[in-house]
Amino acid sequence: MTETEDPRVGAGNAAVKHKLDEFSELFRSGLVLVVHESGMACSKYAQTLIKQCEDRGIRCEMLPIEQVDDLEALIKYTGLFLVLPAPTGGTEDAAVLAHFEAVYAFYRERKPQGLTSILTAGHPWWFAGPVHAYLWGYGPDDVNPFPAQEKPCVVRYFTDPTSLGDIFEDYRPPPFPPGFDANQYLLENGVKYWKLVRDWGVQTLAESDAIYELIEARRAFYDNPIFPKLSKPRKTGEGNRLDQVLQNPDQKFDDDDLEPHQLRDNEAKRKARKAYKESGAKVVRETLKVIRAKYPHVTRPDERTNTKDNQKAFKDLYDATLALHTLPADMRYRVAES
């Protein structure tokens, strides 16, 4: 890869800077949450992170960890930056680390794709949810601060602003074609998603936002362990049954998800897989029922609600409402006027 192709090198190179600027435009639709331990050092360096984000046009909000008490509110953020002391093994540190881990675990379960998905163009940035963990103090490189969870996308130790470095050096922008216009890209995608929700009968962007919030509320609803077949339907899969539909409606119930007695019984295997498939249809059907209780005019195009491919169609609706929900106000206005 040449210098002009790699945005992580040659900060003075005009071509590289231009490519970084274009990539940053894609983040303008997002909102990153910076969560910090309340000590002076972590608070100070959280501000340093925000300054780097603002220099790239990335919008941020900042909260001390003790004020993050509504986990559902994390869903609106397209990225999560955690600033905390390096673990020392002390009792007080353990309590702080446990709070950070709870925040991280909830966010990662809701947005499991992460940075790799952005770099491979597997998911748009507003779905992926990259997580950075910055540990104030000394420690080994690239260690997972939350051993019970999958490692965050970026883990760094720092002791001063210079050791923090460029927080976006791990991002490698996708190759944009000549003449790429990020704002036009946002507009065209916004118009596409607006048409999709309108085809479902959604009448306004405010209504689209409300439907997005209803779906998110149902995701939280199915996390309840009183629904054992829905809250944790697979041994090998993350999230509840509605989460899994919204991630990939085509995912299968694998042999690793079966109980030992089911592995030895072909009929038991068939029934378990059939039950898993039907549970996906059930959570979508119930969620649509909740939506239509408030918005009875919202239904799958051509009145195909609860017919073939309903789970895929519902995921498309969710993806569209999420994308529209995260657009900047000026772009939302242009989309609504299109």
Image (cartoon, rainbow, N blue to C red):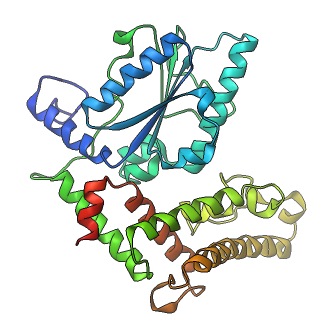
- Kindly indicate the quadrant of the structure image that contains residue 19: top left
Q: Nearer the viewer, residue 148 or 110?
A: 110
For the point 63% across and 14% down, which residue is it?
87
Q: Is residue 285 left or right of residue 308?
A: right
For the point 84% across and 76% down, which residue is it?
267
Horizontal and vertical percent position of residue 139: 54, 10
Horizontal and vertical percent position of residue 300: 50, 84
Note whether residue 131 is visible. no
Q: Nearer the viewer, residue 294 or 49?
A: 294
Q: Nearer the viewer, residue 322 or 236?
A: 322
Q: Is residue 186 left or right of residue 127?
A: left
Quadrant location of the C terminus? bottom left
Q: How many marks?
A: 0
For the point 40% across and 8% down, which residue is it?
160
Note whether residue 264 is visible. yes
Q: Is residue 2 left or right of residue 277?
A: left
Horizontal and vertical percent position of residue 83: 51, 22
